[in-house]
Image: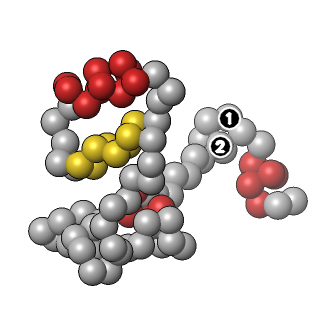
Amino acid sequence: LTLGVHSRIEETAQFVRERVRVGNIYVNRNQIGAVVGVQPFGGEGLSGTGPKAGGPHYLLRFALERTYTVNTTAAGGNAALMSGG
C-alpha cells in the first residue's frame, strides 16, 4: 500500500513514518510514484494496472450501484402522487 503525508511539522511526518506499515510513503509530494499503465498500479489482479488515477472511470472502482425503492402507498402515502395524477 501507499501512503501520503502532508505536514509542515517534521515531527508529525516522522511520527507517522515510523508507525505505518506500508510499502511506499511520500512526504509532502505527489503520492503516485508509479507510471500508470506500465508499473503496477490500481490494485487490479496482482496489484495490476487498473484504471488511471483520477480518470473518468476511477470512481467506479470504489462504488457499488444500488437501486432502492420505497412503496409510499403501503406506508400511508398519497396514492394520487404515485400515479402522477
Q: Quadrant of the C terminus?
A: bottom right
| Left or right of residue 16: residue 76 | right
Q: As rendered, which of 71 and 51 lies closer to the eye?
A: 51
Q: Which mark is residue 76?
A: 1
Say which element carries label 2.
loop
Front position in the image: 66 or 78: 66
Q: Amino acid at mark 1?
A: Gly
Extreme-left residue of the structure? 46
Report which residue position mark 2 lands on. 72
Give left or right: position of 64 versus 76.
Answer: left
1 or 2: mark nearer the eye: 2
Q: Look at the numbered discs 1 and 2 and tell me whether their residues touch, using CB distance below 8 Å.
A: yes
Mark 1: secondary structure: loop
Q: Quadrant of residue 5?
A: top left
How far from the left and from the top, in percent, is residue 45? 16, 70
Asked if residue 44 can be seen in this view, the reply is no
Few, some or many C-alpha atoms within 10 Å of disc 1 (few <14, some 14-19, many ≥20)? few
Disc 2 marks a residue whose amino acid type is Thr
- In the picture as drawn, the residue positioned furthest to the bottom comes out as 38
Above or below 37: residue 43: above
